[in-house]
């Protein structure tokens, strides 16, 4: 296969973006009923044509295995009938959510009778750059459509055939539902030059959202001339406090780590207060080993658990494993746990297990993260679990959006000012 040159990639992306801008202008005028019907049609079409998707996905998975891709990454890539059904259900859930477009954020009447309203409007053209998981293709397309945005979807080359099959199905469903097919477009993934072209399509693309590993996100944030909403990696911690209910702690640690270790809300580090370490760590280690988790422990952890624990290195505390690996450390206090987390956190999700109201309050006030859990699994950091429907990503930045990004986070606002002939006096 001949890959495009940088000039060719720029031309391809600019043509796609121009078509997206045209579609976005039409999409912004569509009523909720049309958008919701299109979303339901997209969901139905994915289920009806799942054989096409599964066949394309099987080719991607086969190629990934041949390239030596880890099983954790293959889990992110692989689709099954159940996962396709889940993707379809997410689209139906988005159809059932309130339409954010036109929502009045605030409104008031000035003393001179001028009425001011801040209302939600679409961003326009949203560029998504993401890795691995082909479900992101449908999630992003659905959320963008519902929020009145056109989507340019640049997935990874590892999922290129899966993504192409999904985009084709979604576009066909849109066209049959009275929605411009160009509201959903796939950007070719066979050359990195298309990423560069998308990042520099300022004026045609309104915002870029990266979703993937640290390398991808850093590249997008550093190189883009298009505004970026930064989603973050998940170096997630669970801290078991001295006052923790140890049965609860074991269940939370286990669920946070092994429910689905390849996703960004999975726990990567366990911190245990020294007062309960001797009681808690052996039972937690046994439960985790039954799930084939490899522990990377500090010296005090290894003193309690033995040589089966891999010695933790400085790198382990900063690693998002996305696999059945867990860094484990014993800390002297809540203060020490917070200090460790502040030094190594990616700002995604942090959790404390405690029966102390004071400890919980201190932890939640001092830990800087998009989501903070008290006596709950880190797996709950998810748009669906928060009641948002599908999410387009989890933002770890502090401007515009933070945490799971759903429909409101895919809008901007405009001020609608209405008068009856008022003019402003000369100063």
Image (cartoon, rainbow, N blue to C red):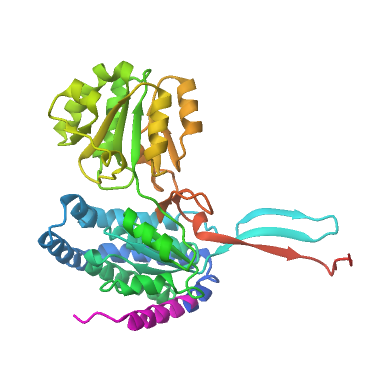
Hey, which residue is sitting farthest front in the picture? 314
x 51%, y 49%: residue: 398
Q: Quadrant of the C terminus?
A: bottom right
Closer to the camera in the image, 301 or 265 = 301
The spot of residue 214 in percent (x, y) is: 33, 53
334, above or below 215, in the image: above
Hey, which residue is sitting farthest left in the picture? 66
Quarter where residue 90 is shown = bottom left
Closer to the camera in the image, 50 or 112 = 112
Hey, which residue is sitting farthest right in the picture? 426
Instruction: Give the extent of the magenta segment.
Output: 1-21
x 78%, y 55%: residue: 109
Q: Is residue 1 left or right of residue 154?
A: left
Count of residue discs: 0
19, above or below 244, in the image: below
100, above or below 260, in the image: below
Quarter where residue 213 is shown = bottom left
Residue 20 part of the magenta-drawn span: yes
61, above or below 376, in the image: below
Q: Is residue 146 left or right of residue 63?
A: right
x 14%, y 32%: residue: 290
Tell me which secondary structure the magenta stretch mostly adopts.
helix
Q: Quadrant of the N terminus?
A: bottom left
The spot of residue 339 in percent (x, y) is: 41, 31
Q: Is residue 36 visible?
A: no
The spot of residue 57 in percent (x, y) is: 19, 63
Residue 397 part of the magenta-drawn span: no
Q: Is residue 414 visible?
A: yes
x 33%, y 63%: residue: 137
The spot of residue 338 in percent (x, y) is: 42, 30
């Amino acid at each position: 296969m001949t890959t495009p040159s940088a000039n060719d990639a720029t031309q391809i992306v600019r043509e796609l973006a121009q078509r997206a801008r045209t579609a976005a202008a039409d999409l912004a005028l569509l009523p909720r009923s049309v958008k919701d019907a299109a979303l339901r049609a997209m969901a139905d079409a994915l289920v009806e044509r799942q054989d096409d998707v599964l066949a394309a996905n099987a080719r991607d998975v086969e190629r990934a295995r041949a390239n030596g891709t880890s099983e954790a990454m293959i889990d992110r890539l692989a689709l099954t009938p159940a996962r396709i059904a889940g993707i379809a259900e997410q689209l139906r859930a988005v159809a059932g959510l309130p339409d954010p477009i036109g929502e009045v954020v605030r409104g008031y009447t000035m003393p001179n009778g001028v009425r001011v309203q801040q209302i939600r409007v679409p961003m326009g053209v949203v560029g998504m750059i993401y890795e691995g998981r082909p479900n992101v293709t449908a999630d992003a397309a659905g959320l963008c459509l519902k929020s009145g945005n056109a989507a340019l979807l640049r997935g990874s080359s590892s999922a290129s055939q899966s993504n192409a099959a999904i985009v084709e199905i979604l576009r066909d469903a849109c066209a049959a539902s009275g929605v411009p097919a160009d509201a959903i477009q796939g950007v070719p993934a066979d050359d990195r030059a298309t990423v560069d072209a998308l990042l520099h399509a300022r004026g045609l693309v309104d915002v870029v959202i990266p979703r993937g590993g640290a390398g991808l996100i850093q590249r997008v944030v550093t190189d883009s001339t298009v505004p970026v909403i930064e989603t973050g990696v998940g170096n997630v911690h669970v801290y078991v406090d001295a006052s923790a209910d140890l049965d609860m702690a074991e269940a939370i640690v286990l669920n946070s780590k092994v429910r689905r270790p390849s996703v960004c809300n999975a726990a990567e580090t366990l911190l245990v207060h020294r007062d309960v370490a001797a009681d808690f760590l052996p039972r937690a280690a046994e439960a985790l080993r039954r799930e084939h988790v490899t522990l990377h422990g500090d010296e005090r952890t290894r003193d309690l658990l033995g040589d089966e624990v891999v010695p933790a290195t400085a790198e382990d505390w900063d690693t998002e494993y996305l696999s059945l690996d867990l860094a484990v450390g014993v800390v002297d206090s809540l203060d020490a746990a917070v200090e460790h987390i502040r030094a190594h956190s990616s700002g995604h999700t942090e959790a404390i297990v405690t029966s102390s109201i004071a400890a919980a309050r201190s932890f939640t006030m001092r830990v800087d993260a998009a989501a903070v859990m008290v006596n709950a699994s880190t797996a709950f950091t998810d748009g669906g679990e928060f009641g948002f429907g599908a999410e387009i990503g989890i933002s770890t930045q502090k401007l515009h959006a933070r945490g799971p990004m759903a429909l409101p986070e895919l809008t901007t606002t405009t001020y609608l000012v209405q008068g009856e002939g008022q003019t402003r006096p000369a100063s």
